[in-house]
Amino acid sequence: MTALTVSEAIQQRGSVRAYTDQAVSRETIEEILELARWVPSNGNLQPWKVHVLTGDKKKQLSDAVFAKMGDQPQGEETDVRIYPKGVTDPWRARRTQCGETMYTALGIEREDKMGRLMQVARNFAFFDAPVGMIFTVDKSMVEQQYLDVGILLQSIMLLAQERGLSTCPQAAWSMWPETIRKTLCLPDSDRVVVGLAMGYVKEGDKAAHIQQQRVSLQEYVSLHGFD
Ligand SMILES: Cc1cc2nc3c(=O)[nH]c(=O)nc-3n(C[C@H](O)[C@H](O)[C@H](O)COP(=O)(O)O)c2cc1C
């Protein structure tokens, strides 16, 4: 295992959208999730459930979504809102920039609507990663518990990074809550929050390392009461 510091893991992690077919061992997955049990949550509610998919089960979920995508390109009614309605600047501009950076790296033109749709669809194959995860919370949970899920998600990504694995968090999966519940036999009370692809990066692929920008420290931090 590569001994990364937390700082290195944070710097080296990036959303990877191209994977080799090299399997990830059950032991590695369990080790990551065993360590991730120790993440904090408000009131120690540990409000999450993590559904880990591989092999036929993963394919079954992808197939179920692909079977519906043609008729329902917008997906199903979501359990959680993915973006604010009519998102405004500066967030709108950042989202546009993010999309443009990705599509430019992939060589997909703005006018190539089908190409862009196909890239969205890649989400539902977990970008061919050997492992996919779906994160759910009970429908009684409120906003603070979704923060807890975010903390869990990033911790899993960093633990994966430490083990030479790559990841891509995927809000896209929240577009298919009914299909996910049906395929994974989840109760109606389970809300689908986010997905995660995990596996070994396919070096050399255009979708392997897409570098996204960040706003500066000055733009997002206000220091109060310092000299
Ligand atoms: C909660 C969350 C959901 C995301 N959903 C998707 C997604 O559905 N599909 C995708 O390709 N990338 C998704 N991303 C990746 C973001 O686009 C990416 O994190 C951002 O552009 C910064 O790039 P980086 O992760 O490579 O540093 C998601 C990221 C987060 C944190």
Image (spheres, rainbow, N blue to C red):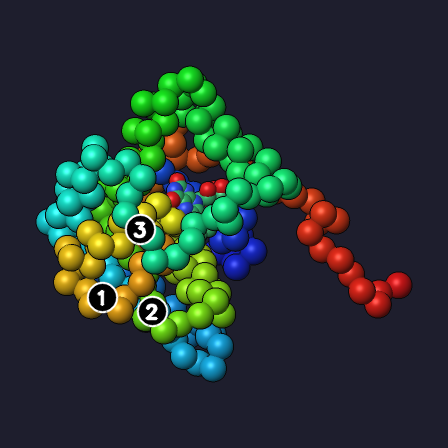
Number of other residues with Cα within 10 Å of mark 1, as a class: few under 14, some 14 to 19, many 20 or more:
few
Residue at which label 3 appears: 77
**Distance Cα–Cα, label 3 vs label 1:** 13 Å
Q: Which mark is residue 139?
A: 2
- Where residue 165 appears, x then y in whole percent? 35, 49
In the depicted view, which residue is nearer to us: 147 or 6? 147
Looking at the rendered structure, the secondary structure element under dot 3 is loop
**Distance Cα–Cα, label 1 vs label 2:** 9 Å
Q: Quadrant of the C terminus?
A: bottom right
Question: Tag 3: residue type?
Answer: Glu
Q: Which mark is residue 68?
A: none
Residue at which label 1 appears: 188
**Residue at image coords 51%, 29%:** 101
Residue located farthest toward the bottom when viewing the structure as drawn: 43
Looking at the rendered structure, the secondary structure element under dot 2 is loop
* Sequence-earlier tag: 3 or 2: 3
Q: Report if the beta carbon of the residue with label 2 is closer than 8 angstroms to ligand 1.
A: no
**Residue at image coords 36%, 73%:** 140
* Sequence-earlier tag: 3 or 1: 3
